[in-house]
Amino acid sequence: MVKGVSRRVVVVNSPDPRIFEQAIFIVRNDALTKDGVSSREIVEEAERVARSYTQGAGKLSRHWRALPPALYAVMGAGGIGLVWLLAALL
């Protein structure tokens, strides 16, 4: 529990609820005064980041889930075999 600290947060609902429900961004206290950024610009940036995360998250995870677990075992064994071969030759 935090006492005596004030934080500015931006809560964005997910564009794709299958990945996450909400994204919470903690905004620096000096962001509004130091850089001259408006509150609306901060919210738009948070929405853009959440949207880009949902667009990119599904592509990579679906690709790697398509590979069978036995293939991972073969790739790991092949990698270890290469390391042993290089160690033996050097």
Image (spheres, rainbow, N blue to C red):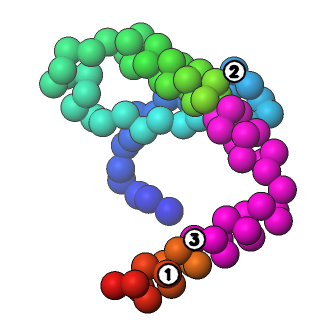
Marks 1/2: CA–CA distance: 49 Å
Dot 3 or dot 1: first in sequence order is: 3
The residue shown at (36%, 53%) is 4
In this picture, is 4 found above or below 74? Answer: above
Examine the rendering and report whether any part of residue 27 can be seen: yes
In this picture, is 72 found above or below 8? Answer: below
Q: Residue furthest bottom?
A: 88
Report the amino acid beneath label 1.
Answer: Leu
- The foreground one among 75 and 30 is 75
- The residue that disc 2 covers is 15
The residue shown at (27%, 15%) is 37
Marks 2/3: CA–CA distance: 39 Å
In this picture, is 4 found above or below 28? Answer: below
Magenta segment range? 57-79
Residue 53 counted in the magenta span? no
Locate residue 7, reporting x and y percent. 39, 40
